[in-house]
Image (cartoon, coloured by chain):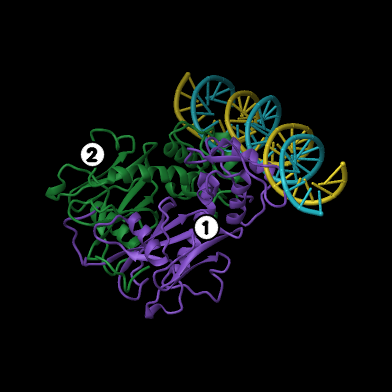
Chain colours: A green, B purple, C cyan, D yellow
Amino acid sequence: MSSSADAGRVSACAVAVDVALLTIRDGALAILLVEPDTPDLSGRWSLPGRRVRDDESLDDAAHRALLELAGIAAPGAHLEQLRTYGEPNRDPHGRVVSVAYIALTPHPPEPRPPAGRARFFAVEEVGGRELALAYDHERIVPDAIERARSKLEYTPLATAFVDEPFTLADLRHVYEAVWGVEVDAANFRRKVVSAEDFVVETAGLSTPGPGGGRPAKLYRRGTATTLHPAMLRPR
Amino acid sequence: MSSSADAGRVSACAVAVDVALLTIRDGALAILLVEPDTPDLSGRWSLPGRRVRDDESLDDAAHRALLELAGIAAPGAHLEQLRTYGEPNRDPHGRVVSVAYIALTPHPPEPRPPAGRARFFAVEEVGGRELALAYDHERIVPDAIERARSKLEYTPLATAFVDEPFTLADLRHVYEAVWGVEVDAANFRRKVVSAEDFVVETAGLSTPGPGGGRPAKLYRRGTATTLHPAMLRPR
DNA sequence: GGCGGTTAGGGTCAGATTGACCAGAACTTC
DNA sequence: GAAGTTCTGGTCAATCTGACCCTAACCGCC
C-alpha cells in the first residue's frame, strides 16, 4: 500500500537510516562505528545514522549519514539495503523505523567526523563484551556481517572491497578476511577465472612487494551480477 | 542512528507495509493482488498494504494488511522482508516509505475481502501489458518473485509452500512451479535427502492419486535454515 | 652473477558431485 | 491379470572440488 484511506491509529513517525560500512583493514573485516557527542548516548558506539528528510531518497540519506557523522564521502562505494528494523520500542525516544544499509568500500577512508568520534573496529571486537552498542545495533551488526559473508558466495561483491585494477591475491585476501578462513590460492584462481564475467584480465602486471615474488596479472571487475558457478564457503 | 539531535528538515512521514503473498496455484506460482474500493485507485490492482500503526511492529502490520484487505489470516505463513521502497515521489499522496514483505503459504487460502476485490494471479499475468499495478508495485513484484526463486536454492523455504506432511513430489512441484523448469524426480530426491536437515522422513505413506502409482513416503520440515549442499537452479 | 626466499600461475590426481538414464516396487484402473 | 502411473533406488559418464606439486618470475644478498 501506500496512502489514502487506511483506517486506524496512524500518526507521525520517523524514518531513519543506519549504515554498516564494511572494509578490509589489516587483513581483517572492519566496521565503522561512531560516537556522537550527544549527551544521551555518551560512551556508546553506534552505527552512523540519520533521519530521512522529506525530499531525500533512502540511499541519499545513507550517504549523508556517512558524511555528516564520519566525514566519509564514498560516492562509489557499494550500497545496498540490509533490512528494516521497526519494533515499536527499539528507540527510547519514540517510534523510529530504521532502514539499515550495508556499504562496502576498499581501503578504509580515514574518518574525519565533524563532531564526536568515528573509527573502524575489527568485527571481532564488536559483539565482544566490552563494546556495547546503542539502540538495537547489536542486532544489526551481525546481520550485516552475515550478509557480506553470504553475498561473497554468489555475487561478485568481493570486488567492491578492492580498488581497480586488482590482483587475484587482493581478491583472495578479501575472501579470507570476510570469511575468516584460508583459501588455497591455486584453486581460488581456477574458480574465479572460470566464473563467467566475474573479473576481466587487463594487460597490466603488478609490481611485487619488498619481499619479491612473481608479478601478478591485473584484473578489473566484470559485468556479472551473480556468480556461475558460485564461490561456496568451505562447509 | 535513530533519534535525537539530527539537523535538517525532518518532518512527519508515513511508514507502510506492502505484502507480496506467494503461493502455488494450479501448478504455477501465483501472487495475491487487491483492488480496494477507493475511488483514486479505481481499476488498478496493487499489493495489499497498510500504514503502520504507532504501537504495531512491521510484521504485525503485514499480517494486518493481509487480513483487512484480503480477509486472509495466515499466522503460520512464512513472512520475511523483501526490501524497503522509499523514493520521495513513489506515492502521489505524499512521502510514504514502504517496507515490502514476501509471504509464502501453502494452497491458496480463499480471499474474502471485506471491501473491494482480492484474488490470486499467476505471476506470468502480472507484468504483462494489460495489468497495470498501482504505485511502484510493478517493481516490487518482480523483486519478490526473484527473491523466492533465489531463496529456494539455498534455504529450505520451498517447504513453506506445502502442508505437512508432504511427499517429495509435492516439494518438487514447488520447485518446478517457482523456477518454471522441469526437475528430474530421481535426482531431486537424491539432493533433498542428502541436504542436511532439509526434510525428515516420517513413518507415513501417501495414498496414490486417481491415476495410481506407488505410495510416496511422507516428510516433515527439517530444522535447517540454509541448505548444504544447495539446490542450484539449472544454469 | 649466483643463490635462497617469495609469490604467481599452471598442472595433476583422487574423490565427490552432477545430470541423464534405467529398472524394479507398489499402487491404480480396466 | 495387463497396462499405466508414480515412487525409489541404482548405474555411469562427465564435471567439479580440494589437496598438492612444479615451474616462472621477481626480490635481496653475497
Q: What element carries label 1?
A: strand
Please state which of residues B181 and A186 is positioned toward the viewer in this rendering: B181
Please state which of residues B37 and A182 is positioned toward the viewer in this rendering: B37
Q: Give residue A56's position: percent from left, percent from top.
A: 30, 67
Please state which of residues B54 and A39 is positioned toward the viewer in this rendering: B54
User: Residue extending furthest left?
Assistant: A39
Quarter of the image that includes the N terminus of chain A = bottom left
Q: Give residue A135's position: percent from left, percent from top.
A: 23, 47
Q: How crowded is mark 2: few (under 14 residues within 10 Å), some or many (20 or more)?
A: some
Mark on residue A32? none
**Is residue A24 visible in this depiction of the protein?**
yes
Q: Residue at x 22, y 51 (%)?
A: A91
Q: Subunit of mark 1?
A: B
Q: Distance between the residues labelled 2 and 1?
A: 42 Å
Instruction: Please state which amino acid type lies under the numbered disc 1.
Output: Thr
Quadrant in the rendering for residue A224: bottom right
According to the image, label 1 marks what residue?
B23
According to the image, label 2 marks what residue?
A132
Q: What element carries label 2?
A: loop
Instruction: Please state which amino acid type lies under the numbered disc 2.
Output: Ala
